[in-house]
Amino acid sequence: MNPLTAYFSLENKVALVTGAAGGIALHIACALSAAGAHLAILDDREQEGRIIARLLDGKKDKVRFWQVDVSDNDAVQRVMAAVEAHFGRIDILVNSAGVDADDRSMQANVNGSILCSKHVAPAMERAGGGSIVNVLALRAMDGAQQEAADHAAKTALRMGNMNAMRYAMQNIRVNSIHPGVVRPPALAAARRKQNDLTQLLADRAELQMLTGQGSAADVAAAILYLASDASRFVTGSELVIDAGPACR
């Protein structure tokens, strides 16, 4: 294998992705699985989660689904133990579960990621280290006032990178990515939330510095980098994937 290619290989590693029954998290799960990882899918949507696991697995016994509410401390602790018992280790956690509803965003988006990180850390330490990646909204980096609860949740979750210092001695890296507006499924969500999607896209296109339209695959590629040994000396970083608006 080419040495550079080996950096991005996830062979013999176990990756856990929350919220992977749909949305960008599903694309992330597919990318990690394609890179060779054994995959644990965590979501509260049982039917969708089991279907995704079955489609990705192809009878290789490398993908399994666990139903869990990531904001439930005891449930998260039990599932982390079950994943480690099943696969023998946990190397990667992608915190990508979240909701848009204002009344639940703090609980699911922030508490869920904090709990998953807390309860996965001992397993990663036993495995000799690992990588935690938090998927945040671009709103966590700007001063947007709309959707106050979601903005507060994502901004608070940005503080989770303080775990980079906390877990460094256990060889656990903690990084975050901030996706901008990309093609479906993100645009599908925007369509449901915005009265004028055309205007939304026009505004973003006017701000972005690079040409073209991003996709969920671009986000998944960034996750692969942060999850793999290609970023083995990267921790506490925030990677923005938005074609440039955050620069302005």
Image (cartoon, rainbow, N blue to C red):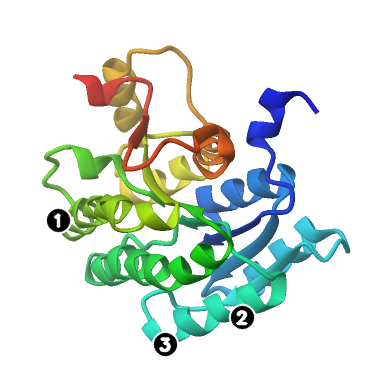
Count neighbours of disc 2 (C-alpha within 10 A) and say few if under 14, some if 14 to 19, many if 20 or more: few
Q: Which residue is mark 3?
A: 74
Question: How far from the left and from the top, in percent, is residue 204?
Answer: 31, 25
Tell me the residue at 28%/64% (across/down).
Answer: 110
What secondary structure is marked by label 2?
Answer: helix
Marks 2 and 3, how far apart at CA: 12 Å
Q: For the view shown, which residue lies furthest in the front direction?
A: 169
What amino acid does circle 2 point to?
Answer: Ala
What amino acid does circle 1 point to?
Answer: Ala
Mark 1 and mark 3 lie on one chain; the one further toward the N terminus is 3
Question: How far from the left and from the top, in percent, is residue 62?
Answer: 77, 62
Q: Which mark is residue 148?
A: 1
Marks 1 and 2, how far apart at CA: 36 Å
What secondary structure is marked by label 3?
Answer: helix
Tell me the residue at 52%/63% (across/down).
Answer: 124
Q: Quadrant of residue 16?
A: bottom right
- Residues 38 and 58: in front is 38
What amino acid does circle 3 point to?
Answer: Asp
Left or right of 142? Residue 184 is right
Tell me the residue at 47%/45% (across/down).
Answer: 188
Quarter that holds the C terminus: top left
Count neighbours of disc 3 (C-alpha within 10 A) and say few if under 14, some if 14 to 19, many if 20 or more: few
Left or right of 124? Residue 60 is right
Q: Which mark is residue 82?
A: 2
Marks 1 and 3, how far apart at CA: 28 Å
Q: Quadrant of residue 203?
A: top left
Q: Dots 2 and 3: beta carbons under 8 Å?
A: no
Quarter that holds the N terminus: top right
